[in-house]
Image (spheres, rainbow, N blue to C red):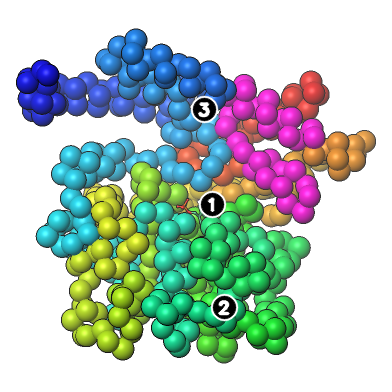
Amino acid sequence: MDKNLLKAVYSPEDFRERGHRLIDELANHLEDKIQEKSNNAIDWNIPKKELVFWENFLYNGDTSHFFREILGRTTQVHHPKYIGHQVSPTAPITALSAMVSALLNNGMAIYEMGMAPSAIERVVINKLCDKIGYDSSSGGFLTSGGTLANLTALLSARKAKVSHDIWNKGHKEQLGIMVSEEAHYCIDRAAKIMGLGEKGIIKIPVTQNFKMDTSLLQTYFDKAKKEGITVFAIVGSAPSTATGVYDNLKAIGKFARSNNLWFHVDGAHGGAAIFSEKYARTVQGIEQADSVVIDGHKMMMMPTITTALLLKDDINATATFSQKADYLLTPTDHEDWYNSGKRTFECTKTMMSVHWYILLNTYGEEIFDEFLTRLYDMGHQFGIILQNDPQFELATPPESNIVCFRYTDSHLDTFALNQLNGHIRQSLLEDGEFYIVQTKLRGIHYLRTTIMNPFTTKEHLQQLLEKIKKYSKQI
Ligand SMILES: *Cc1c(COP(=O)(O)O)cnc(C)c1O
């Protein structure tokens, strides 16, 4: 055993030297991608080859090349031709806050294991609640991802709306939630985890434009009731992931109130519109929600993974995981905001609040407005470009930075077009200049883009369409 190994691991000098080198490498990387000095958004490699590379590198690779290898083997979210999934091109300053969190390793479950980040979290939560339009009884916390936050919100809903003590005693009756058929799959998963089963997920059909059809709510609710289902919550998407279309939160909120249901807004992607002067209208009615989820790592420029779960009444945050029945909570329990573990699913979590805070502190909340507004504007512009080109067809007019479309050709039937668009997307992936994804809506295969990079321009999008036309002729 090498006695000096531990000393080497914790050597401040070694850290300083490697750190400076890495920051230089990352800054070069950023420059290279943002300014498009290299052309590709992804250098695609098949999983098997990638695996062989890393198996080999473990024993034969030179550690000093490790980070560089990773930089070359990643999807380049900072490249303006990355127009794929919904993760942020991180604001570089949050890479620094992430490093602080990694080194300090505050456990966060209790206040003593994260004094500064716990207080910072409260400041961030209050800011978000304020932007939503909640009053001073609101609250919430940060947690690891929209998936977990949605599950937690539904647990809060069940605790608040179902009168008996399910947490301790379980339940026999059929419980249910109402949700659009276009909602993110994690809502379905959360409901299944909660034991609601297929029957407990009441899927509301969508309109032609993929919005929850709110004219059907009463009918579906009454039908569920007749079947003996105790419906306790309804979920609105802001927007839904596949299409980027917002549900009518005002109408859903009204329905929830008149039927005493918990109203949850899944704003993982676009809840950040609360910061946008221009697009706040997309989330009109959000202030009526009992709970709201907003991802920091999607439309707010933060590294994965950090999500805000905001509650109209902060009491529900403490009640959710309380082993005691609600009525046994003392007033001090309610004020115990600084012991994170009582409120979150996680025990240990990262000091994620520092990312939110450093952006607010350094650039002000206007930065969230600028980022989202710029990207939504581009989404609308892309929609117009597509509408004016007879070779393309939009799935629905874009309401955000998510745009689904397909290449069309009047000589081909649906089946052939589906195949063609699938091939186009595969060719784009293997080519690597652009990174876009795909989705199926009502049996039709669409190319799916999310404009996540504020430096993506109309010209980039036009180049993408030219490339698609070129491939469609080759296939
Ligand atoms: C991305 C997304 C989720 C899942 O959030 P994660 O942070 O990826 O766990 C949930 N709902 C919607 C609408 C989303 O866009």
Q: Amino acid at mark 1?
A: Tyr
Alpha carbon separation for disc pair 1 and 2: 37 Å
Mark 2 secondary-structure assignment: strand
Mark 3 secondary-structure assignment: loop
Q: Is residue 137 above or below residue 9?
A: below
Image disc number at residue 181: none
Q: How many marks?
A: 3
Q: Position of residue 28 (x, y in %)?
A: 33, 22
Residue for badge 2: 175
Residue 3, picture quadrant:
top left
Alpha carbon separation for disc pair 1 and 3: 21 Å
Nearer the observer, disc 1 or disc 2? 2
Q: Is 440 one of the magenta-colored residues?
A: yes
Q: Amino acid at mark 3?
A: Ala
Q: Is residue 361 above or below residue 311?
A: above
Q: Is 80 one of the magenta-colored residues?
A: no
The answer to which of marks 1 and 3 sits earlier in the sequence is: 3
Q: Quick one: quadrant of the C terminus? A: top right
Numbered range of the magenta stretch: 419-448
The answer to which of marks 1 and 2 sits earlier in the sequence is: 2
